[in-house]
Image (tube, grey):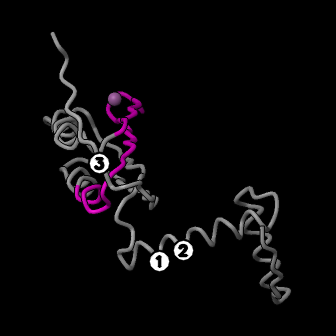
Amino acid sequence: MERFTISLEERLAKEFDALIRDKGYRNRSEAVRDMLRGSIEGARMARDDAPYCTGCLSYVYNHHERDLAERLTAIQHRHHDLVVSTTHAHLDHDNCIESVIVRGATRDVRAFADALVAERGVRHGHLNLVPVDVHAGKHVHVHAKPKS
Ligand code: NI
């Protein structure tokens, strides 16, 4: 663990403390670490230096909308190599929220997320990507078909 000290104007320090208190941080170090991770990984994404990622795609939709639930399931099946799991919750009589955990080549994950969010009726789509290292790059794409 490396330690470093930073100097802040009093006003900036106060605003920073108020911000991190509102966000629930117990101390400045954890808040600064999260901000640094966000900036570093954001920059990595921006310069396209994140070939593999894991992440979470979330969105809201109305399941009464024509064929929408079926279309969303079809897109997920088409990309079953990227989809690790999907959690679905019924918000009320009409609206559902889904959270899809994804993993794979960043380009493919983005294309999958874009296609899903672009479906008519999908709202508040948000993809949270986390760059990861993969060992040897051997990506096993398994088709698991039930025997009977
Ligand atoms: Ni539902």
Callout 1, which amino acid? Answer: Ala
> Residue 47's x, y, as percent?
38, 79
Which numbered marker is on residue 61? none
SS class, disc 2? helix
Segment tinted magenta in the rendering: 84-111
Please identify the quadrant where the N terminus is shown: bottom right
Report the residue marked by disc 2. 40
SS class, disc 3? loop
Which numbered marker is on residue 139? 3
3D distance between C-alphas at marks 3 and 1: 25 Å
Callout 3, which amino acid? Answer: His
* First of labels 2, 3 by sequence position: 2
> Residue 90's x, y, as percent?
39, 29
Q: In which quarter of the image is residue 137?
A: bottom left
Report the residue marked by disc 1. 43
Magenta-span inclusion, residue 127: no
Could you say which is closer to the camera, residue 131 or residue 66?
Answer: 131
> Residue 56's x, y, as percent?
42, 49
Residue at horizontal 23 percent and vertical 50 percent from the top: 116
Image depth: mark 2 or mark 3 in front: 3
